[in-house]
Amino acid sequence: MIQLQSESASYQGVETLHDIDLSVSEGEKLALVGQSGSGKSTLIKLIYDRYPTNTSLVPQDYGLVNTLSVFHNVYIGCLAQHSTAYNLLNLIRPWPDQVEFVRKILIQLQLDEYLFRPVGRLSGGQKQRVAVARSLFQKGQLLLADEPVSSVDEQQSKVVLKQLTNGFSTMVLAMHDIQLALSFCDRIIGLEKGRIVLDSPSSALTNNDLLNLY
Amino acid sequence: MNTVYKHSPAWNVSWFFVVVATISLFFADIEIISLEPWQELKRLFLGLVTPDWSNPLEIGEAFLQTLAFAILGVAGGSAIGFLLALIFHWRWIQIACAFIRAIHELFWALIFLQIFGLHPLTGLLAIGLPYAATFAKVYAEILEEGNKSALQVISQDTSLISTFFYVRLPDLWVHFKTYTSYRLECGLRSSAILGFVGLPTLGYTLSSAFMEGHYSVVWALLILFYLLIATIRYWVRPALIPFYIIIAPFIIANDSEISFDNVQRFFTEDIIPAPIRNGESFSTSWHWFSDLIMTQAVPGITNTLVLTQIALVATGVLSLLLYPLISKHFFNPIGRGAGHILLVVMRSTPEYILAYILLQLWGPSMFPAIVALALHNGAIIGHLTGRYSSEVKLRVDASKGLNRYLYELLPRLYGQFLAFLFYRWEIILRESAILGILGIATLGFYIDSSIQELHFDKAMILIVITALLNVVVDTLSRYLRAKLRLKTSVDCRACNDYCAAG
């Protein structure tokens, strides 16, 4: 499904990824682990550039519109599936069907009581869950998530990752929490200074193996 | 709990203004009263493609006068404004400046014409006074907002002047410089339109050419004016400014003399209300005054407000339509370049000139005035909003086109846009009053008529009423901005960049 061969990428003029060979089949759940600056975000961006169709994204800075409500921010995930007139009317008065669809997702993420609250008034962890909700609403064959649970507490992290795992068959997640990476993903890619130094199924690894990367 | 959908306060306030504007439309006379409106428009555009520079001496003279008045007026205003800024913490100075600022330069010109005739002092004071008041306020803000930590470490014995030049001025200099040079651009526009009331600047030549139907000359003047403003940063250099200030007084047309009899008579007789001057009884005075209010002030105020409210909403709508033209989220650099030129032309043309042209073409109704105000102010706010929008960072998977406009940009920009619009509200009101001189029944019409009938006492009262109206709207605008918590992240002095004086 994803095929990268000897790829490299730059960020702000500096080459941050070197010689990337990566192959991902459908149904695989990958975790990218490594120190900050090792190239995880750049690799996520690279994959998105190559495979933007039917791909859901959870970027590191969430990309939410603070003046719009949680509902509208989640709805943005499927703007492309409706006519512009439908989208415009949704801004003036939310379509009840769409509200129900969104509400179902928010309940799973414990955000339903903030359905119509402006996103600007949420905490960091709540905003992050809204960004996750948008990706779940959008559905899609592939999920690319850059630190999707970094601002969320331990118990909620597990809830969020469970939802993502159920919602997407194929995922590539950049994570700094190795425990969560090993629990929810079946394949671990380790990055160091822009190169892939580890590519192994989770079952064959322990915590200690991964600590070497940090 | 936020489980029931509620629109934001900004949404509600916006629709309130739209409703007010719609109601105002019923009170406005907006028909096009012209025999062949499209013919004239066609002839006007023909002039655009055939500009006529065959009279360089006349054009050059008009431009020199415009420049001389602008430079001296702004320089003088800046100097006095600075001195006032130093004592701006006194309440009565703030009130006095607010009042002086509320009167448009053209109204000041009409006043000074009665005192000094066509002597250059009329033009210089007409620009200098309101500009001094505006400079006072902005300079005071700059001084206030400047970092004062260095002041705390300086020895108590240091003289005030040394303190100022060593500790305060170096950091603040760039703010003073930026604002003052933007104000010079405004000064050029103000100077140009003073020609419409008789002073020898651009407006005079332009209106003469227009009356004779020489549209080619009109466009030649306008194009040169745009070039002058567009190249401002090339000829306004700090080293050259003292030079300009020194030669300007020699350039200024100076063949009138001030009659001191005029001056004296103006202050002791002309502006004293007639019944008081003639020692009439209280009931006669009251009758005179209430007659003035009912037959002139009230219709003037109503029409001014009607025009302002319609123009305000029209400006808002137009800005929202125009800003994508210069936003990097919608157009490539070539498209944006064209957008820039369009907006620069629209905002460099003084509203007065735009209104003048449209009124000549379409007749004396409110419609041309609405269009003129909306085009000029829409371009200004469109530019500011567009510039702000280019700073917004979008996600890589952000939607495109109309969806992008509605969901990604408009919600993020709306607060800033409203702040700009409310800031401009008071300026639009001031312009609406002034456009009365051109024939529509706003306050300017009654003021101008009173002056022509030599009823300077009535004119003064009406001018004071106009200033008060302006102060009321300014206060209301401030209140709304505070209530809706509309703070501009782009410094609101940027709004001043595009002129508190049109």
Image: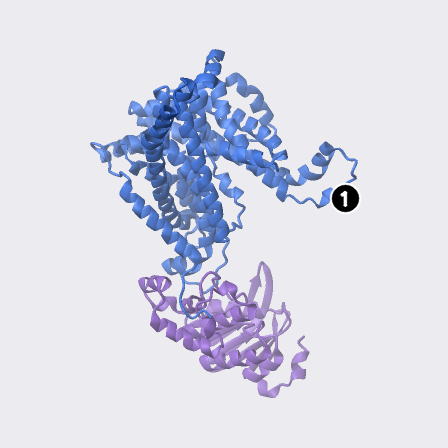
Chain colours: A purple, B blue
A11 left or right, relative to B341: right
> Label 1 belongs to which residue?
B153
Q: With respect to residue B239, does A142 lie above or below?
A: below
Secondary element at image label 1 = helix
Q: Amino acid at mark 1?
A: Val
Front position in the image: B256 or B54: B256
In x, y percent, where is residue B163?
A: 73, 36
- The answer to whether residue B257 is seen in the rendering is no
Q: Quadrant of residue A60 in the image? A: bottom right
Q: With respect to residue B440, does B17 lie above or below?
A: below
Q: Quadrant of residue A199 in the image? A: bottom right
In x, y percent, where is residue B243?
A: 59, 23
Q: With respect to residue B19, does B41 lie above or below?
A: above
User: Looking at the rendering, in which quadrant would you find the C terminus of chain B?
Assistant: top left
Residue name at image x 44 percent, y 32 percent: B227
In x, y percent, where is residue B443?
A: 36, 32
Q: Chain of mark 1?
A: B
Disc 1 crowd, CA 10 A, few/some/many (<14, 14-19, 20+): few
- The answer to whether residue A145 is seen in the rendering is yes
B192 left or right, relative to B21: right
In x, y percent, where is residue A2?
A: 48, 75
